[in-house]
Image: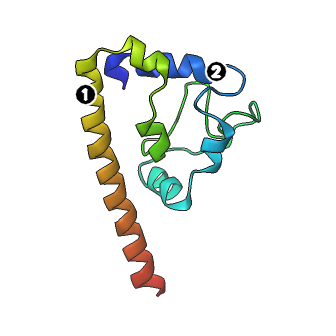
Amino acid sequence: MAAIGLNDLCTTCAARPGGGCCSAAIGNDCDTPLLLTNLLLGVNIVCQDNDPASCRFLGPSGCPFAAKPIFCLNYNCEKILVKVRKEDMASLYRLVGETLGEQGRVEGMIFDFLRETYG
């Protein structure tokens, strides 16, 4: 995302009132396995005291998560689709698929561990 300029574009939009795509509904959709995965990856998760319409995790530099919710990886607003070249979008879609596959494997390992440990 950074290589094709989306970090700056998305952070600018997210800083507006309401959080743009980074809305409270997205923050409310972050589940325990996603949060645990981020903690295991060394992410310092802090609930922000920001606009109540924005994602509660959205910090001053944008999204802190290394492992992101599915919506955040899959959704591309009109601003993105207009700005980014088709070749770059194709690469982004491929990387998103790989990322979601890896996140799914990590979540599966977490669930397996919990089942084996706590029955």
Secondary structure of the residue carrying tag 2 is loop
As displayed, is residue 46 above or below residue 37? above
Q: Amino acid at mark 1?
A: Ala
Residue 68: tell me if it is visible. Answer: no
Sequence-first tag of 2 and 1: 2
Residue placed at 59% from the left, 33% from the top? 22
Query: As rendered, which of 74 and 7 lies closer to the eye?
Result: 74
Q: Indicate which disc residue 102 carries.
A: none
Instruction: Give how far across and how far down residue 59 sits, in percent.
Output: 61, 31
Number of residues whose C-alpha sits closer than 10 Å to that of mark 2, classed few (under 14), some (14–19) or many (20 or more): some
**Where, by quadrant of the figure, is residue 13 drawn?**
top right
Instruction: Give how far across and how far down residue 38 sits, in percent.
Output: 47, 50
As displayed, is residue 105 above or below residue 4? below
Q: Please name the residue that numbered disc 2 is placed on.
A: 15
The span from disc 2 to disc 1 (Cα, nearest Å) is 27 Å
Quarter holding the N terminus? Answer: top left
Q: Amino acid at mark 2?
A: Ala
Residue placed at 50% from the left, 58% from the top? 36
Q: Indicate which disc residue 90 carries.
A: 1
Number of residues whose C-alpha sits closer than 10 Å to that of mark 1, classed few (under 14), some (14–19) or many (20 or more): few
Q: How is the image coloured?
A: rainbow
As displayed, is residue 90 above or below residue 99? above
